[in-house]
């Protein structure tokens, strides 16, 4: 029997509110399945199960405040063996009892005319989805959050015009998001001794290669420069493990894989930097696909717990219309962050001649407890080198 | 497809990318990406949506035609009529 505990969803949040169970007692669950939805300052986060088995019981009711480490559910694993509660040692659970709202009645959905969960109703209201047209997949055909979301997304891809959204929660939630960013960035500056390096990289080859490739592809298969940057960073950092991992409890642990976080700006303000898992092992097209998918979900206010908690290094790219360079701030508990300015056509000296080249200012900020400037400079050089051979990315 | 139909579809898809924007205030010759703060991912999503709805896959070298509302409607209406005249897609 394994106790499933509330996972950490990033350095800047500590508790969320459980808004929906997606797996009920008796349901089979496998590792990676979305088991519950937790509302946080950053939006609705899907919590994934770590193990495979059958849900035995819920240990927290809908509406409860769920801090990191709190017991959420009992999962009966195959063979009846106690499964690891989480992939990493969970934060110590608070010794006081979980903060819980009064348990809800056993069948709250029965009271509603149309059987839909509160989270589903909220989403439907915000996105103009007709509940009566949604197929329910919850208990006894009740409509749950993912059903409404799926219906809305299907409406989007069918090319149906979406109904105008009312001034959505992102505007109202901006204060909460701002507070979360403030907490994380203040902590970063307080705790992490940053050092900073930068260098101009000639990325003409990458950009020309990308343009040639995109010219013969339909839009949904085209690449953005950010995808090349992500792959270059992921490959480069393999030789520089002191830039890829987490600093916790006074020590650095290098990560076995690279999960590159990508900073995504939200409309109306705010910033999140969720991870693309296994970045180094993905093809460029897969990185691009993951990037677009992530950006779309993030802007819809919906992403997964593991995407927030897992980045091992982050890239902040200003895209093609940003300013010349960015000096970013490390997201704790990571130990490095790479910045990339907007590529700009500049006069450059090549083989003794002044020629126009696409120049991208690459910067790195790193944790001086873990690495030094000499290695940071080599990492930047390695990233720039990778961008000279885009076909190998 | 008429220019008005193209414009209507274009505005719908723009509003999916920039849902909080007041599109009625958009000037025909204003730079769309600047006015509406649309980044490269947003713009790519727009191009993908236009491809789906109008059957027009705008090549990268033609992105500059989509810089303003007026330019975009003209370009897309033109391309859409070519698509229907030559339906091999």
Image (cartoon, coloured by chain):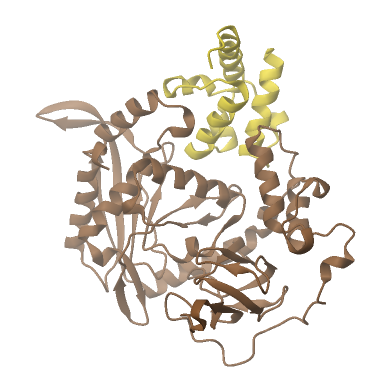
- Residue sitting nearer the eye, A135 or A365: A135
| Quarter location, residue A176 | bottom right
Q: Is residue B12 visible?
A: yes
Q: Residue at x 83, y 70 (%)?
A: A108
Left-right relation of B5 to A233: right
* In-image side of B55 versus A106 (left or right): left
The picture's colour for chain B is yellow
In the rendered image of this protein, does residue A274 appear above or below residue A104? above
Residue at (56%, 9%) from the top-left corner? B82
Q: Position of residue B57 (x, y in %)?
A: 51, 22
Q: Could you say which quadrant of the image residue A217 lies in?
A: top left
Number of marks in the rendered image: 0
> In the rendered image of this protein, does residue A40 appear above or below residue A95?
above
Q: Nearer the viewer, residue A244 or A347?
A: A244
Where is residue A312 drawn, in percent x and y? 36, 63
Q: Nearer the viewer, residue A186 or A28?
A: A28
On screen, residue A382 above or below B69: below
* Residue A363, x across and y down, in percent: 30, 52
Q: Is residue A166 above or below residue A118?
A: above
Report which colour depicts chain A. Answer: brown
Measuring from the top left, give residue A303's x and y in whole percent: 56, 57
Residue drawn 50% across and 72% down?
Answer: A51
> Which image quarter: residue A204?
top left
Nearer to us in this view, A212 or A375: A212
């Amino acid at each position: 029997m394994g106790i499933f505990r509330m996972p950490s969803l990033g350095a800047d949040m500590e508790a969320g509110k459980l808004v929906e169970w997606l797996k009920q007692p008796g349901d089979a669950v496998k590792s990676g399945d979305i088991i519950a939805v937790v509302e946080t300052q950053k939006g609705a986060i899907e919590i994934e199960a770590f193990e495979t088995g059958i849900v035995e019981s819920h240990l927290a009711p809908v509406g409860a405040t769920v801090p990191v480490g709190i017991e959420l559910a009992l999962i009966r694993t195959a063979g009846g063996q106690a499964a690891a509660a989480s992939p990493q040692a969970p934060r110590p659970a608070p010794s006081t009892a979980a903060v819980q709202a009064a348990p809800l009645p056993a069948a709250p959905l029965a009271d509603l005319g149309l059987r839909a969960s509160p989270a589903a109703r909220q989403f439907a209201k915000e996105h103009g989805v007709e509940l009566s047209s949604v197929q329910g997949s919850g208990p006894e055909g009740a409509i749950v959050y993912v059903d409404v979301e799926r219906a809305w997304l299907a409406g989007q891809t069918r090319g149906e015009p979406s109904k105008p959204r009312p001034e959505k929660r992102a505007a109202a939630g901006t204060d909460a998001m701002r507070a979360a960013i403030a907490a994380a960035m203040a902590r970063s500056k307080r705790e992490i001794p940053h050092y900073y390096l930068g260098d101009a990289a000639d990325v003409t080859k990458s950009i020309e290669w990308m343009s040639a490739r995109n010219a013969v592809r339909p839009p949904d298969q085209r690449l953005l420069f950010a995808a090349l940057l992500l792959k270059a960073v992921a490959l480069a950092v393999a030789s520089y493990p002191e830039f890829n991992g987490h600093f916790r409890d006074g020590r650095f642990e290098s990560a076995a894989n690279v999960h590159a976080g990508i900073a995504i700006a939200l409309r109306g303000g705010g910033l999140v930097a969720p991870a693309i898992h296994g970045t180094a092992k993905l093809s460029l097209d897969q990185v691009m696909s993951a990037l677009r998918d992530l950006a779309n979900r993030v802007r819809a206010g919906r992403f997964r717990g593991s995407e927030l908690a897992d980045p091992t290094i982050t890239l902040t790219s200003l895209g093609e219309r940003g300013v010349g360079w960015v000096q970013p701030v490390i997201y704790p508990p990571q130990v490095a962050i790479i910045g990339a300015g907007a590529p700009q056509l500049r006069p450059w000296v090549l083989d003794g001649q002044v020629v126009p080249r696409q120049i991208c200012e690459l910067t790195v900020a790193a944790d001086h407890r873990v690495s030094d400037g000499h290695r940071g400079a080599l990492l930047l050089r390695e990233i720039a080198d990778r961008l000279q051979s885009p076909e190998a990315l | 497809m008429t220019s008005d139909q193209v414009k209507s579809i274009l505005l719908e898809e723009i509003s999916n990318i920039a849902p909080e924007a007041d599109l009625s205030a958009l000037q025909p010759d204003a730079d769309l990406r600047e006015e509406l703060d649309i980044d490269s991912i947003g713009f790519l999503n727009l191009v993908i949506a236009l491809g789906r709805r109008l059957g027009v896959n705008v090549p990268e070298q033609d992105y500059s035609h989509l810089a303003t509302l007026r330019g975009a409607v003209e370009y897309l209406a033109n391309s859409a009529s070519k698509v229907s005249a030559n339906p091999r897609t």
